[in-house]
Image: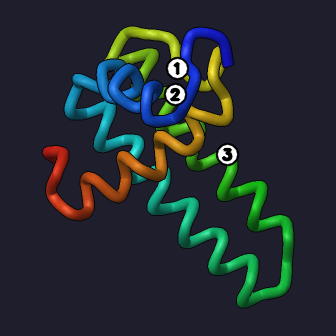
Amino acid sequence: MSGFSSFREFYPFYLGEHHNRTCRRLHFVGTSLSIVFIVTAMLRDNAWWLLAALVSGYAFAWVGHFFFEKNRPATFKYPFYSFAGDWVMYKDILIGKIKF
């Protein structure tokens, strides 16, 4: 994870990569769908829904980055911090700390 010694150090960079409101909204939709698919996987006892969760989360986020934010997703360089950043940003949007 070159360049960042902690998630706390990484998160401001992550937020800086999400200035575009549409990009943030797409992240939120993708993460929300991921939650639905994870719950569906548990309720139906079918792990294939986890693949849907993974695909929906990343697909919406990457569309946001490539077409609206016009940058490269942090996932490519910082996969673990980026994954955590998405969930923290989701929470921050839910509680109103970040504009939706």
Q: Quadrant of residue 64?
A: top left
Q: Quadrant of residue 46?
A: bottom right
The reply to whether dot 3 and dot 2 touch (C-beta < 8 Å) is no
How far apart are the alpha carbons under marks 3 and 2? 10 Å
Residue type marked 3: Val
Alpha carbon separation for disc pair 2 and 1: 7 Å
Q: Please give the label number shown on residue 24.
A: none
Residue at point 37% right, 53% down?
90
Rendered residue at 61%/25% (across/down): 75
For marks 3 and 2, the one nearer the N-term is: 3
21 relative to 60 in the view: left or right:
left
For image coordinates 77% across by 87% down, the residue present is: 44
Q: Nearer the viewer, mark 3 or mark 1?
A: 1
Q: Percent x, y for residue 22?
A: 25, 33
Answer yes or no: do the residues labelled 2 and 1 have beta carbons within 8 Å? yes
Residue situated furthest front in the rendering? 5
Residue 8: image location, x then y, percent: 44, 35
Question: For the residue carrying disc 1, how many other residues have a C-alpha within 10 Å: few (<14), some (14-19), or many (20+)?
Answer: many
Percent of width and height locating residue 30: 48, 50
Q: Name the residue type under label 1.
A: Pro
State which quarter of the image contains the N terminus: top right
Horizontally, residue 1 falls left or right of residue 85, namely right
Residue carrying label 2: 62
Examine the image and state in which quarter residue 32 appears: bottom left
* Residue located beneath label 1 in the image: 73
Q: The residue under label 2 is which amino acid type?
A: Trp
**Mark found first going from the N terminus, 2 or 1:** 2
Mark 3–mark 1 distance (CA, rounded to whole Å): 15 Å
Please name the residue that numbered disc 3 is placed on: 55
